[in-house]
Image: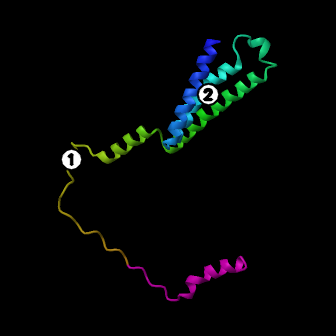
């Protein structure tokens, strides 16, 4: 009886902290906190003392399984969102800092500044003699589609 009361109180406190976290616009962390706080409540609702006798016929136990399923859904959905965003806030911050530092090796050799040569001149493209030829293929496509 005392263990069930303590677990219920911990669940209520955890849901309160999750609500405050959601108020601070940290919804992913709030969902994760809600999932953690629903686990003890779900375990209390399933009833562990008379497991075999009461589980099959107890609506409270099935509701507890539903709460545990909701907690699992919150865990998995927050993890999926975290993966889609590219990791936790700390990991993104570290990756951004690493990108700003750059990846230049300090012992890299300087580029060679030997005698340069001019690149070969590009051959000039011959201008088309008839601009109507340019649009003939476009006209064929439009006629094909009935436009």
**In this picture, residue 121 sits left or right of residue 4:** left
Residue topped by disc 1: 109
Q: Position of residue 36 (x, y in %)?
A: 57, 28
Q: Position of residue 112 (x, y in %)?
A: 20, 54
- Label 1 or label 2, whichever comes before in sequence order: 2
Q: Is residue 25 magenta?
A: no
Marks counted in the figure total 2
Q: Position of residue 40 (x, y in %)?
A: 61, 22
Label placed on residue 38: 2
66 and 101: which is toward the camera: 66
Residue at 55% over, 28% down: 14
Comparing marks 1 and 2, which lies closer to the viewer?
2
**Mark pair 1, 2: CA separation:** 59 Å
Q: Is residue 141 magenta?
A: yes
Q: Cβ–Cβ below 8 Å for labels 1 and 2?
A: no
Depicted 73 relative to depicted 8: above or below = below
Residue at 54% over, 34% down: 18
Residue at 70% over, 10% down: 49
Helix or strand or loop: what does disc 2 sit on? Answer: helix
Depicted 117 relative to depicted 68: above or below = below
Q: Residues within 10 Å of mark 1 (few under 14, many from 20)?
A: few
41 and 128: which is toward the camera: 41
Q: Position of residue 27 (x, y in %)?
A: 53, 41
- Which quadrant, please, contains the C terminus? bottom right
Residue at 48% over, 85% down: 128
Quadrant for residue 136, please give it: bottom right
- Which quadrant, please, contains the N terminus? top right
The residue positioned farthest toward the right in the image shown: 57
Bounds of the magenta segment: 124-147
Depicted 93 relative to depicted 54: above or below = below
Helix or strand or loop: what does disc 1 sit on? Answer: loop
**In this picture, residue 58 sits left or right of residue 10:** right
């Amino acid at each position: 009886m005392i263990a069930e009361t303590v677990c219920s109180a911990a669940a209520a406190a955890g849901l309160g902290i999750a609500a405050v976290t959601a108020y601070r616009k940290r919804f992913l962390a709030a969902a994760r906190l809600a999932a953690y706080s629903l686990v003890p409540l779900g375990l209390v609702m399933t009833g562990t003392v008379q497991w075999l006798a009461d589980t099959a016929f107890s609506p409270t136990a099935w509701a507890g399984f539903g709460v545990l399923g909701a907690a699992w859904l919150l865990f998995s959905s927050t993890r999926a969102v975290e993966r889609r965003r590219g990791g936790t806030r700390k990991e993104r911050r570290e990756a951004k800092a690493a990108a700003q530092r750059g990846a230049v090796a300090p012992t890299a050799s300087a580029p060679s500044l030997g005698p340069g040569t001019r690149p070969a001149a590009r051959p000039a493209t011959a201008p088309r003699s008839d601009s109507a030829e340019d649009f003939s293929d476009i006209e064929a496509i439009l006629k094909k589609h009935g436009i």
